[in-house]
Image: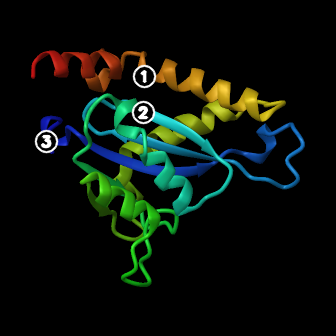
Amino acid sequence: MNRRSAWERVQIDIKYVPEECIQFGTHDQKYYQITALDEYTRKRVLRIADEKSTYQTAKFLENLEKELGFDIKKVQTDNGKEFTNSESDKKTLFELKLEEKGIEYGTTRPYSPWENGKVERSHRLDSKYYADKKFKSKEELLRAIKKYNTRYNNISRKVLGFKSPNEVLKEYKENQ
């Protein structure tokens, strides 16, 4: 697939925030990072959630297009229960929110993480980021993730011809 055909296609996935990073009293509360990554610009949106659920992923979709800066045509996820209900025909809150927004939805084949490879690769970078982090409060975690994501979207990348995701998005909009 060339980069042009990837425009307005977004991969979404969720990962655990490593427990060793959380240095504040959580009472066994786990935190999750929801990641959306545009296949063309590689622009990312990150959100921290306190549960892995279709409620949280549906809520994530509410402002996603505004945060990315364009209308999304298609979303792709893995088959996680936080996205889809593969055991019945009943749609999840996430799927209903996509339908409400008029966004096409597709899932990867089971046990095929390479089909969501761009977002999976970005999660490998995130694992390196979290490796030496210690957050003393939830607010500190949220601020750090916001700063980290802003930096990510403003760093030039070889795959983008040494432009940042924000520069590629700006150029694309100017040429429309």
Image vertical order of residue 54 relative to residue 66, above or below: below
Q: Secondary structure at mark 1?
A: helix
Which residue extends farthest front?
100
Which residue extends farthest left?
176
Residue annotated with mark 1: 153
At x 28% / y 29%, what residue is drawn?
41
Q: Nearer the viewer, residue 166 or 108?
A: 166
Tell me if residue 115 can be seen. Answer: no
Q: Nearer the viewer, residue 90 or 125?
A: 90
Measure the alpha-carbon separation of dots 1 and 2. Answer: 7 Å
Q: Quadrant of the C terminus?
A: top left
State if disc 2 and disc 1 touch (CB < 8 Å). yes
Question: Which of the labelled discs sits on residue 44, or is there none?
Answer: 2
Question: Which of the labelled discs sits on residue 5, or is there none?
Answer: 3
At x 41% / y 78%, what residue is drawn?
86
At x 90% / y 43%, what residue is drawn?
25
The residue type indicated by label 1 comes to Asn
